[in-house]
Image (tube, rainbow, N blue to C red):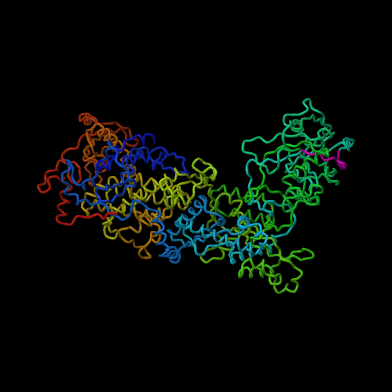
C-alpha cells in the first residue's frame, strides 16, 4: 500500500486537461491515504470492519491509486455542467498532469490546440443519473415510487416460483432502534430481495414482541405514587398496550427508512388477539401432550422484579463478589457403614461445608457427599504461623450482589470461631493441603472414609434445632473447590432439588417474593437475603462457633437482565414445560436443521442437553394469561382440552384482556358453568419467550403466503439460548418437528476499536444519524440508507463486526465509486438501443469479449455469494470488478472510441454492446444490497427493458440477469494472455511516468512505446497486436499512446537506445524491454493522437486519418448533443 500511495497521479496518464488531471490526482491521493480502504488490496484481507478486502495481482495494484477516480470523471468544462466526478468540489493542485483525454477536445481551443472547431463532433456522455446521490431526498422518493406502484405486492402476485419464507424474530417494542437492529433487518432484506430477483414468492411479515416486564415498568415509572395505587390490572394492561403500539409505530418508520420491504401494514404483534389465541393453542397442545405441569421447585427468582425468570432472562456480569463461608456442622451420629475404629470420635467430629450463599442456611436439609471420593477425618491444631496470608485480617465482602470494579481485588478473608472450637472435621482427602493453607491451621489426618460410608450419618444444624442426614449427591461434588461436602438446600438449587427428591428431603424456602426471610427463618424474619439477612446469618454462625472462615469470592452470578439486579434460587409454585419429556425429540429436530455457521448446532445442542425444565409462568399482569382455574378449597387446577379451547375462542374475539375483566362463569365452557363458584381464575402470565416462541404458529402457520417450516430464521448468536430455542421447544413439544429449515446467526456490533458501544464511552452509532445526518452536517453528514446497507454487506457478520465514523466514510467512498461506475455506463448509452444496436458476440474485438468473460465470471460468483449468505464476497467481487476491471482498465481504454468514433460506428457500438450488458447485469446484481441506487439507475435507463412479464418498470421486476453462455467461451489461453497484457501495460506506464517527469513528454498520447520481449511466443503475440487485425485491439489503445513498436531483438532495442527505458521480468511473460520516445508525426486537433498523416487532408489539415472520415461522414448533420444532468 505504501508503494501505491507514494506514486504520482501522473502515472495514470489519462488524457484529460490539466485542471481535471490535477483534480483527479488530489482525489486519488485522498482515496488512498492511510485509514481509507483501498478498493484493491493484496491477497491477504485488510482487517477492517469484517472483510474489507479484495484480491488483486501486483500488476493490478500498480497505478490503482492514481487511476481509480479519474477514470470515472468527465470534465465539467466539456459538458457545460455535466460532471461525473464524486469530488467535483476539490480544487486542482499545481504540478500534477494526467493524460490529456479525448474529451478535452471539446474544450474551447487554447494555445496549440487551435480554436477547437470540432468540439461538437465528440460523442459526449449524457444522463440524468446524478453523481450526487442526495440520499436524504432521493431515497424516500424511490420508496414512495415502490409504494405507489405496489411493486412488492405485484411481484408476489405475479410470481409463479416456490415460496421463500424468512421468518422475522420479533424485536422488543421498547425504545429506539440501535445499530444491531439495522444489521439484522438489512441482512434479512438483502436475502429477501435476492430471492425476489430469483423469481421466488416472497412475503416478509415483520413482527414485534409486545408483552413483558420492561414495558410494564415503563408504564409504572411514568405514573405518580397515587396513580399507581389506583392502578388495576386491566388499566395497567391498557396503558402497556398503548406504549407498545406507539413504540411499534416509531420503530416501523425507522425500519422502512432502511429500505426494508415487508408487510408493514399487517405486521404481527404478540399483543394482537389472533396471535394470543394461537399462543394459547400451542400451550393447549403441550398440555394435552403431557408436557405442562405445575410444581413447587426452585427457580430463578428476581426480587427486584418479583417474578420467576427463565434462563434466557439472565445475564452474568463481570465483577460480582459474594460472601463465601466454610461452616462446621456437628455430627450427631455415624452411619452403620462408618469405620468402627473411628466411631470413638463421635461427638467430636463436624462436617465442613462451603457455600457462596450463606442466606440459604435456613433452607439446609442435608449435606451431600460424593460416594466415590475419599474423605479424611482431620484434627485441627494451631499452625506455626497462627494466621495464613489467605486468612489474614481484612474486610469481608459487603454483600453477594456487590460488584467490584474490574481489576480490583476482593477483600481478604476472616477466620471464624470454629477454627478454635472444632476438634475434628470431615473434608475431602485431596483437599487437606489446600484447606490447611487457606484456614491457617495444621490438619492432621486421623482416619479415612469413603463417601458412601458417610451416607446415613446425621448432623445438627448450628442455627436451628433439627437434625438432617448425610446423603449421596451427584457428579457435581468434586475436589476442585470447597471441601468436598455440599450444603444441600432443595428449595434453593436445582441439583439440591434433585437430590432432595431422591431422599425425600423437606423443601424449605423461607423467602418471600421481595427476597426477605419469612417467619420460617425464625429470628431472621424480615431481613433481605441479599443484604442484611446474609450478614446476619454469617454473624449467627460465628456466634454459634460454627463459622470456620469467611472470605470474598469473585464468580459469575445470575442477574435479572432487565433490572440489572442479582437473582436468587427460590422454590415456588410455578408452571413448567417438561423439557425432560421431549428433550430427545428436540435434539433429533436440531439435527434436521441447517445451522450457519455450523458452530450454532453445537451451541444449541449443548444448551438443550444441559437445560432443566422450563419455568413458563410469571407473576406479572402484562402478558398472556395461563388459562387455568383453581379449586378454591383444594387448590387443584382445572385445565382441560375443553376449558382451554373455550378460553382460546374468547381471546381470539376479545383479546387476553377478557381474562382480567370477565367473570369465571363466562370464561368457563358450558360443561363447567354450574360449578363456576367453586373456581378462581389463575393470575400467572406466560414467559415472554413463550410468546415469541409461538410465532411459528401465530404467523408462519397462520398467514396466507407463508408455509411451515420457514425456510430461514436469522438473528444474533445470543438467540441460541433465546428465540431459536424457545421456538424449537414449543414446536417440537406440540408438533414434533423443528419450525425452521435453516438458522443463520450474526455477531454483535462493536465500535471501530472493537469495544462494546455505550453512551458513557460516546461510541454509539445511531442508524438515524448515519442515514439523515445530525444537526451539524459537516461533522455528522447524511450518508443515506444505501451506505449503511453497503456496510452490512462488507462485513463478515458470522463474528462480531465493527462500525464507526471512519468506517462509514470508507463505505461512502465505495458507494460513490459504485455510483460513478453506473453513471459512466448510463452516460455512454444515451444513444444506444439494445433492441437494435447490439452487435453479435462473435464479431466483437478481443478486448470486449475478454471483458464480457470477466463479467460472466463475476456474476456467477456474486450469485454464489448471495446463495451462501456470504455478502462480504459480493462486496469484494463487485468493488474489484468496478474499480479494477472497469474503471482502471476497460473504461479507460474505451473513452477514445466512445467519444471520437462515428456515433454508429462499429468500434463504438461494440463498446456500447459491452457497456449495455455490463449495466443490465450490475444494476440488478447490486439491487439486493443497494436497492435505492439500483432503482435510481433503472429509472434513468435510456430505453425500456422488456421481460417475459412485459416492460420492467422497476429493477426488481426485471429479475436476476442471466449471462449469455457464449460469454464463457473466451478461452483460458486467451484470458491468460490478456492478464499478461495488463502486467505489460503497467510496465509501460512506469516508463511513461519517467519520461513525463523528465519533461520528454506531457501527456501519454505524445509517446511512442517501444517493446521487446525475449520470449518468442510473447513477442509474436505483441507484434500481432501492434498494428492488429482488429483496430480496437491495437496496443496503442491498450497503452493510450499514439504509437507502439515491437522490436524483433534485444540488439534492435539497444540500437534504438531509447532515453527512457526499463527491463522487467514478468511472470508468464519473461524478460521485457520497455522504452518510450516521442510519438511520430503531428497532433490531431480532434482526438489529440499523434500521426504522420496529420495534414494530408486538404479539407481537414489538422485531423488524423481516423478523425477525417468521421467528420466527412457527419457532414452537415447536426452534432450529437449531450444532455447535461
Residue 688: image quadrant is bottom right
**Magenta span: chief secondary structure:** strand
The answer to whether 903 is drawn above or below residue 58 in the figure is below
User: Residue at the spot x=29%, y=38% of the render?
Assistant: 93
Residue 207, image x and y in percent?
54, 60
Q: Which residues are magenta?
A: 326-338
Q: Is residue 827 magenta?
A: no
Furthest toward the left, the residue is: 1098
In depth, the one of 536 and 37 nearer the eye is: 536
Q: Is residue 726 visible?
A: yes
In the rendered structure, the answer to whether residue 193 lies left or right of residue 27 reads right
What is the count of numbered marks? 0
In depth, the one of 152 and 866 nearer the eye is: 152
The answer to whether 619 is drawn above or below residue 397 in the figure is below
Residue 925, image x and y in percent?
40, 53
Furthest toward the top, the residue is: 384
Amino acid at each position: 500500500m505504501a508503494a501505491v500511495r507514494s506514486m504520482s497521479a501522473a502515472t495514470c496518464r489519462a488524457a484529460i486537461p490539466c485542471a481535471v488531471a490535477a483534480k483527479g490526482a488530489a482525489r486519488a491521493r485522498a482515496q488512498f491515504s492511510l485509514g481509507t480502504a483501498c478498493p484493491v488490496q493484496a491477497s491477504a484481507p485488510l482487517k477492517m470492519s469484517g472483510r474489507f478486502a479484495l484480491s488483486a495481482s501486483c500488476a493490478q495494484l500498480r497505478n490503482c491509486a492514481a487511476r481509480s477516480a479519474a477514470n470515472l470523471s468527465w470534465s465539467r468544462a466539456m459538458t457545460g455542467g455535466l460532471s461525473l466526478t464524486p469530488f467535483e468540489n476539490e480544487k486542482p493542485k499545481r504540478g500534477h498532469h494526467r493524460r490529456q483525454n479525448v474529451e478535452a477536445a471539446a474544450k474551447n481551443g487554447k494555445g496549440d490546440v487551435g480554436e477547437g472547431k470540432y468540439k461538437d463532433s465528440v460523442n459526449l456522455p449524457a444522463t440524468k443519473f446524478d453523481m450526487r446521490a442526495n440520499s436524504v431526498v432521493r431515497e424516500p422518493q424511490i420508496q414512495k415510487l415502490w409504494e405507489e406502484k405496489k411493486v412488492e405486492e405485484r411481484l408476489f402476485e405475479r410470481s409463479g416460483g416456490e415460496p421463500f419464507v424468512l421468518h422475522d424474530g420479533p424485536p422488543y417494542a421498547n425504545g429506539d432502534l440501535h445499530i444491531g437492529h439495522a444489521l439484522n433487518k438489512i441482512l434479512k432484506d438483502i436475502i429477501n430481495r435476492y430471492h425476489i430477483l430469483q423469481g421466488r414468492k416472497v412475503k416478509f411479515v415483520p413482527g414485534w414482541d409486545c408483552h413483558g416486564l420492561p414495558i410494564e415498568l415503563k408504564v409504572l415509572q411514568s405514573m405518580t405514587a397515587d396513580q399507581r395505587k389506583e392502578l388495576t390490572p386491566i388499566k395497567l394492561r391498557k396503558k402497556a398496550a398503548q406504549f407498545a403500539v406507539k413504540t411499534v409505530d416509531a420503530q416501523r418508520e425507522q425500519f422502512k427508512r432502511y429500505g426494508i420491504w415487508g408487510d408493514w401494514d399487517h405486521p404481527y404483534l404478540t399483543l394482537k388477539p389472533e396471535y394470543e389465541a394461537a399462543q394459547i393453542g400451542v400451550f393447549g397442545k403441550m398440555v394435552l401432550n403431557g408436557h405442562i405441569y405445575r410444581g413447587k421447585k426452585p427457580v430463578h427468582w428476581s426480587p427486584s422484579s418479583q417474578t420467576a425468570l427463565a434462563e434466557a432472562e439472565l445475564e452474568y456480569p463481570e465483577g460480582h463478589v459474594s460472601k463465601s463461608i466454610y461452616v462446621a456442622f456437628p455430627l450427631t451420629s455415624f452411619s452403620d457403614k462408618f469405620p468402627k475404629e473411628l466411631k470413638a470420635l463421635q461427638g467430636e467430629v463436624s462436617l465442613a461445608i462451603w457455600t457462596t450463599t450463606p442466606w440459604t442456611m435456613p433452607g439446609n436439609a442435608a449435606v451431600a457427599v460424593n460416594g466415590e471420593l475419599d474423605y479424611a477425618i482431620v484434627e485441627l491444631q494451631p499452625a506455626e504461623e497462627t494466621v495464613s496470608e489467605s486468612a489474614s485480617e481484612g474486610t469481608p465482602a459487603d454483600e453477594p450482589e456487590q460488584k467490584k470494579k474490574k481489576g480490583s481485588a476482593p477483600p481478604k478473608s476472616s477466620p471464624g470461631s470454629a477454627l478454635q472450637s472444632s476438634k475434628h472435621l470431615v473434608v475431602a482427602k485431596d483437599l487437606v493441603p489446600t484447606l490447611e493453607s487457606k484456614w491457617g491451621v495444621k490438619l492432621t489426618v486421623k482416619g479415612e472414609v469413603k463417601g458412601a460410608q458417610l451416607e446415613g450419618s446425621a448432623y445438627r444444624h448450628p442455627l436451628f434445632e433439627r437434625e438432617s442426614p448425610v446423603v449421596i449427591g451427584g457428579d457435581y461434588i468434586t475436589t476442585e473447590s470447597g471441601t468436598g461436602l455440599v450444603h444441600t438446600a432443595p428449595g434453593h438449587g436445582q441439583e439440591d432439588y434433585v437430590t432432595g427428591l431422591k431422599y425425600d428431603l423437606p423443601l424449605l424456602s423461607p423467602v418471600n417474593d421481595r427476597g426477605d426471610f419469612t417467619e420460617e427463618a425464625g429470628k431472621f424474619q424480615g431481613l433481605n437475603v441479599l443484604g442484611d439477612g446474609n450478614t446476619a446469618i454469617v454473624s449467627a454462625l460465628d456466634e454459634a462457633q460454627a463459622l470456620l472462615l469467611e472470605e470474598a469470592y469473585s464468580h459469575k452470578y445470575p442477574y435479572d437482565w432487565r433490572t440489572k439486579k442479582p437473582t436468587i434460587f427460590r422454590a415456588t409454585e410455578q408452571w413448567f414445560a417438561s423439557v425432560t419429556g421431549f428433550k430427545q425429540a428436540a435434539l433429533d429436530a436440531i439435527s434436521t436443521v441447517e445451522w450457519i455457521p455450523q458452530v450454532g448446532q453445537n451451541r444449541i445442542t449443548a444448551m438443550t442437553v444441559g437445560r432443566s425444565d422450563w419455568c413458563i409462568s410469571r407473576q406479572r399482569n402484562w402478558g398472556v394469561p395461563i388459562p387455568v382455574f383453581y379449586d378454591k378449597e383444594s387448590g387443584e387446577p382445572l385445565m382441560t382440552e375443553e376449558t382451554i379451547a373455550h378460553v382460546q375462542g374468547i381471546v381470539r374475539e376479545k383479546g387476553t384482556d377478557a381474562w382480567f375483566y370477565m367473570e369465571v362463569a363466562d370464561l368457563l365452557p358450558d360443561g363447567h358453568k354450574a360449578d363456576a363458584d367453586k373456581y378462581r381464575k389463575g393470575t400467572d402470565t406466560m414467559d415472554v419467550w413463550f410468546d415469541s416462541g409461538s410465532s411459528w404458529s401465530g404467523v408462519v402457520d397462520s398467514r396466507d403466503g407463508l408455509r411451515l417450516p420457514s425456510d430461514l430464521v436469522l438473528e444474533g448468536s445470543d438467540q441460541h439460548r433465546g428465540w431459536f430455542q424457545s421456538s424449537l421447544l414449543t414446536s417440537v413439544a406440540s408438533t414434533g418437528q423443528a419450525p425452521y429449515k435453516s438458522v443463520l446467526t450474526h455477531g454483535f456490533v462493536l465500535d471501530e476499536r472493537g469495544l462494546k458501544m455505550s453512551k458513557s464511552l460516546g461510541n454509539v452509532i445511531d442508524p438515524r444519524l448515519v442515514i439523515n445526518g445530525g444537526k451539524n452536517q459537516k461533522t455528522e453528514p447524511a450518508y443515506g440508507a444505501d451506505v449503511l446497507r453497503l456496510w452490512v454487506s462488507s462485513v463478515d457478520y458470522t463474528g462480531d463486526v465493527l462500525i464507526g465514523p471512519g468506517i462509514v466514510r470508507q463505505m461512502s467512498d465505495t458507494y460513490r465509486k459504485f455510483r460513478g461506475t453506473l453513471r459512466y455506463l448510463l452516460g455512454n448509452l444515451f444513444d444506444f438501443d439494445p433492441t437494435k444496436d447490439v452487435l453479435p458476440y462473435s464479431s466483437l474485438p478481443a478486448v470486449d469479449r475478454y471483458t464480457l468473460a470477466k463479467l460472466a465470471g463475476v456474476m456467477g460468483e456474486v450469485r454464489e455469494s448471495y446463495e451462501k449468505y456470504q455478502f462480504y464476497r459480493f462486496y469484494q467481487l463487485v468493488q474489484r470488478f468496478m474499480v479494477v476491471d472497469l474503471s482502471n482498465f476497460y473504461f479507460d481504454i474505451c473513452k477514445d472510441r466512445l467519444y471520437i468514433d462515428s456515433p454508429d460506428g462499429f468500434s463504438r457500438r461494440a463498446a456500447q454492446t459491452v457497456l449495455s450488458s455490463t449495466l443490465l447485469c450490475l444494476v440488478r446484481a447490486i439491487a439486493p444490497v443497494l436497492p435505492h441506487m439500483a432503482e435510481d439507475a433503472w429509472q434513468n435507463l435510456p430505453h425500456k427493458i422488456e421481460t417475459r412479464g412485459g416492460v420492467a418498470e422497476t429493477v426488481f421486476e426485471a429479475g436476476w440477469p442471466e449471462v449469455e453462455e457464449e460469454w464463457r467461451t473466451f478461452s483460458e489461453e486467451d484470458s491468460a494472455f490478456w492478464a499478461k497484457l495488463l502486467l505489460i501495460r503497467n510496465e509501460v506506464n512506469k516508463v511513461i511516468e519517467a519520461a513525463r517527469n523528465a519533461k520528454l513528454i506531457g501527456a501519454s498520447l505524445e509517446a511512442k512505446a517501444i517493446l521487446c520481449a525475449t520470449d518468442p511466443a510473447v513477442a509474436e503475440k505483441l507484434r500481432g497486436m501492434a498494428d492488429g487485425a482488429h483496430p480496437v485491439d491495437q496496443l496503442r489503445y491498450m497503452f493510450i499512446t499514439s504509437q507502439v513498436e515491437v522490436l524483433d531483438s534485444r540488439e534492435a532495442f539497444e540500437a534504438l537506445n531509447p532515453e527512457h527505458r526499463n527491463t522487467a521480468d514478468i511472470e508468464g511473460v519473461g524478460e521485457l524491454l520497455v522504452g518510450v520516445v516521442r510519438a511520430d508525426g503531428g497532433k490531431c486537433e480532434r482526438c489529440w493522437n499523434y500521426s504522420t498523416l496529420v495534414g494530408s487532408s486538404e479539407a481537414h489539415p489538422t485531423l488524423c486519418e481516423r478523425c477525417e472520415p468521421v467528420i466527412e461522414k457527419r457532414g452537415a448533420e447536426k452534432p450529437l448533443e449531450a444532455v447535461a444532468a
